[in-house]
Amino acid sequence: MKGLQGYSMNLDYIDISKFLDKDRICLDYLQRNAIYDGAEMYYFNGCRKIEVWMRQATNQVNIKGSIPYFINGHNFYASHQDWLEGLDYIQGCLNVNIYSGQVNSFEFGTIQEIPFPEPDFLNHHIKVRGMEARAYHKGQVLTGREFVSPSLKIKLYDVQRNIKTKLDKPIRADLSRDYGWDSRKHYIKLENHYRQPEAYFKGNVQLSELLSSSFQQDLKKGLLTSYQSIMKTGTTAIPKSKADINAGTIPLMILKELEGLYDFNTEELIKGKLKEIPEDVFSPDDRKARLRTIRDNLKKISQQGGSRYDIAELLQARLEA
């Protein structure tokens, strides 16, 4: 059993383009699916995980998809060797050197076991400065978050839900036997989706360069940096006494966690709101009494050093391993 400790930070989806020059692509192993705007789209016979696009006008081929899904039928585990075998197979079928192709976009990430339910974990990862935040739900359940810029998208999502809803029972049995997947545990996927590698890395990236050990090491460090850039809540310590948790304490705990992310002072905001209440509703003594109660509740709330939902140390250990 390889287990999750064997799951390294690695590539997933990729989009590669290659100008053919005088080369002719072999179509013997492909089946044509459709034509879109002059481009012909093919799949490999019996497998729809990889798309092959032929653009006659530019004499260009595009290869898109998840190599782990193509080779293994899942992306729970994929070694560097799996990637090389998958790419070699595609290259051999097409009779084109794809290692000299340009990488148009790709994903690099890892799966991490976490000690919290996935929706709780996701609820406490709020934003990244300068990036658009998006949240994804299935019904009322939070299943993923993304933080998006023009060249990079940071993704966090519930792996267990994907496995249980997208993978057949035989594959789930293989994951349990070979890789230590446990349906009772909690797993999160962290990914950097490089939407524009040429902009992010200040130049075009060839597939051979992407697969080099030095580039892979930089991607691992970049993944940890991306995670550390996510602002997290979960910094307040929950009072140990039931008597210290009342209807007024709970919203104050939330406000105290958010004030560090959104740069406000909880007590000052509340004092300002109290001043807005007309005197025919609240007398000066009423305001003082309410503020005194709020201050008493604030004294029950203490801050921890960091978010209890922060898994940076677990990811750091994975990086060093």
Image (cartoon, rainbow, N blue to C red):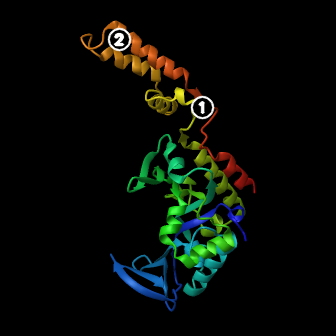
Residue behind mark 1: 240
Q: Quadrant of the N terminus?
A: bottom right
Q: Examine the rendered structure and indicate whether residue 89 appears above or below residue 101.
A: below
Query: The residue under label 1 is which amino acid type?
Result: Lys
Task: Reply above or below: 153 against 256.
Answer: below
Q: Nearer the viewer, residue 273 or 215?
A: 273
Q: Position of residue 217 (x, y in %)?
A: 69, 57
Residue at 50% x, 30% y is 253
Nearer to us of marks 1 and 2 is 1
Residue found at x 71% / y 59%: 214
User: Where does residue 285 sit, x and y in percent of width and height?
Assistant: 36, 7
Foreground of the two, 113 or 117: 117
Q: Which residue type carries mark 2?
A: Asp
Please tell me which residue lies in front, 140 or 245.
Answer: 245
- Disc assigned to residue 286: 2
User: How many neighbours does mark 1 have within 10 angstroms: few (below 14), some (14-19), or many (20 or more)?
Assistant: few
**Whole-number angstrom distance, CA of label 1 to CA of label 2:** 30 Å
Residue located at (55% from left, 38% from top): 234
Q: Residues within 10 Å of mark 2 (few under 14, many from 20)?
A: few
SS for dot 1: loop
Residue 167 in sight here: yes
Q: Is residue 96 above or below residue 275?
A: below
- List the single residue furthest toward the left: 280
148 left or right, relative to 278: right
Element type at mark 2 = helix
Q: Earlier in the sequence, mark 1 or mark 2?
A: 1
Q: Quadrant of residue 91?
A: bottom right
Q: Position of residue 166 (x, y in %)?
A: 48, 71
